Image (cartoon, rainbow, N blue to C red):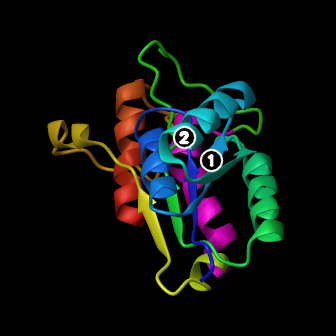
Amino acid sequence: MKQKVCVITGANSGIGKQAAIQFASAGYLVVLGCRNKIRGELALQDILTASGGSAMLLLVDMGLKASILEFAKQLRAQFDTIDVLIHNAAVFDLAQKERQLTSEGVESVWMTNHIGPVLLTEQLLSLLQNSDDGRVLLIASKGLLAMPGLTVDLQDSEFAHRRFTVTRAYYQSKLAQIMYG
């Protein structure tokens, strides 16, 4: 039987790392999609030790379209099937007081937390469809319960014309993920 493949973005800490341990323990080959090579390598060792399973690291910055496209290209070159894709990578830095653009000119929270996962899913859709039971999991936030009236502002999703707060940007991006899913 062929080993199942699980790809997890933001797998170097928190929920992503714990999910990686669980999937590797269950016999999946886990691909850690991490932005930082050193943190990714440390997490990879922890995951391998904790799970006794198999995992590998590929670098990806979910805030950059070029990085996502390269990550997807590497995955398509190595695998003909992906069984699980978990979008866990996110930007939520309470110290951020102003809107920040990526080097590609997109607001960083919106790009990393929503646009990046949509782009990656689209790039990997054929591999997910090759699975007998392919799944895409979007990690949202229980904090959305505290903002019951929140909507996704499709006219200004990047906060170019309204006051930016990282909290509103984060929860808007997470709500958009739920709507996408």
Of residue 41 and residue 70, the one placed in the foreground of this image is 41
Q: Are marks 2 and 1 in contact (CB under 8 Å)?
A: yes
| Mark closer to the chain start, 2 or 1 | 1
Q: Specify the amino acid type for callout 2.
A: Ile
Q: Residue at x 49, y 46 (%)?
A: 51
What crowding class fits label 2: few (fewer than 14 Cα within 10 Å), some (14-19), or many (20 or more)? many
Secondary structure found at label 2: helix
Of residue 64 and residue 23, the one placed in the foreground of this image is 23
Estimate the x, y position of residue 67 in percent, counting from the top left.
77, 47
Estimate the x, y position of residue 112 in percent, counting from the top left.
57, 42
Of labels 2 and 1, the one closer to you: 2
Estimate the x, y position of residue 152 in percent, counting from the top left.
36, 50
Q: Is residue 121 magenta?
A: yes
Secondary structure found at label 1: strand
Residue marked by disc 2 = 47
Q: Specify the amino acid type for callout 1.
A: Leu
The span shown in magenta is 106-126
The Cα atoms of the two marked residues, 2 and 1, are separated by: 10 Å
Residue marked by disc 1 = 32
State whether residue 176 is above or below residue 98: below
Q: Is residue 30 magenta?
A: no
Q: Principal SS element in the magenta part? A: helix
